[in-house]
Amino acid sequence: MPVIELKDVSKLYGFGDATTIALDEITLRIEKGEFVAIMGPSGSGKSTLMNIIGVLDRPTHGTYILNDRHVARLRSGQQARLRRDKIGFIFQSFNLLPRLNVIENVALPLAYKNMTQVRRLKRAATMLERVGLGDREYFLPRQLSGGQLQRAAIARALVSDPSIIIADEPTGNLDSGSSRVVMELLSDLHKEGNTILLVTHNPELTRFASRVVYVQDGAVIGDEQSAIGEVSKIARKMITLLPKTTEEDDLAGVSALMKSIPGGDKLLSQARKRGRKRATKPTKRRRKTNLRGKR
């Protein structure tokens, strides 16, 4: 049985002629223990899809079943408990509270479980040790590096012992070294049996996934199993299909912009003339080379 199942799920925003289709009848099944990378260009609907899976938003049409429970049939309080107990969220922007220290930030989700403060802090300390931040418990978020902030965010996502981890561009604000550490942590969680959903635009990160789903224009247009350690075929294919801008494209864009400005045509013409003069005029270095050649 799948842990996540969506049947003909659609999400619409607006009304009448102003209606926008964010998701268009998506059907998707995710088994327990899978590491699924969700890819797609900006505006493709992948974040909307994750919000629905994470019970942060509701579909306009269709059925969503999470752990054998029809989410739409649950009251708001039941949905909140399901989200709290079963799902851990990791965001690109970390979302740590700046006035709380690291251990207080990590322990915060446990406050909604009626757990004593001593137990909350003890469990938070255990999670911080797990992600390598045991010596940063009482630091404020501003005192941490980007990679450390993201590891603290992972500790906060794990503190409630969820079975599903949703990571929305978790390495988007990190350098390559910190990104590797974060992805290794997610890989370890996957090996322990957790279900991982990773939203990313980086094809290289699909090396950590066992499955890649590609979303475009609100629909799933690709879904394939992938060998861990390899960039998936669909990710490689989508790289080659991405439009490549050329110098002519850039100039065309500048030209269109200038024409929209009063007097822009004249300014554009003058700029082109100056550019042609620079292109045909030899540089000082070239003149010296020519003189030496004549000698």
Image (tube, rainbow, N blue to C red):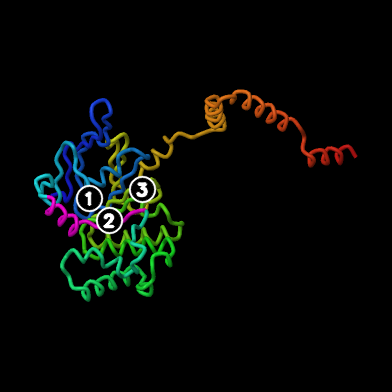
Element at badge 2?
strand
First along the sequence among labels 2 and 3: 2
Q: Residues under labels 2 and 1: Cα distance?
A: 8 Å
Specify the amino acid type for callout 1. Answer: Gly
- Determine which residue is flagged by label 2: 89
First along the sequence among labels 1 and 3: 1
Percent across and percent down for residue 229 are: 36, 54
- Determine which residue is flagged by label 3: 200
Q: Give the residues in magenta.
A: 76-92
**Residue depicted at x 70% and y 30%:** 274
- Determine which residue is flagged by label 1: 54
Percent across and percent down for residue 242 are: 43, 36
User: What secondary structure predominates along the stretch shown in magenta?
Assistant: helix
Percent across and percent down for residue 122 are: 25, 75
Whether the residues at callouts 2 and 1 have beta carbons within 8 Å, the answer is: yes
The quarter holding residue 268 reads top right
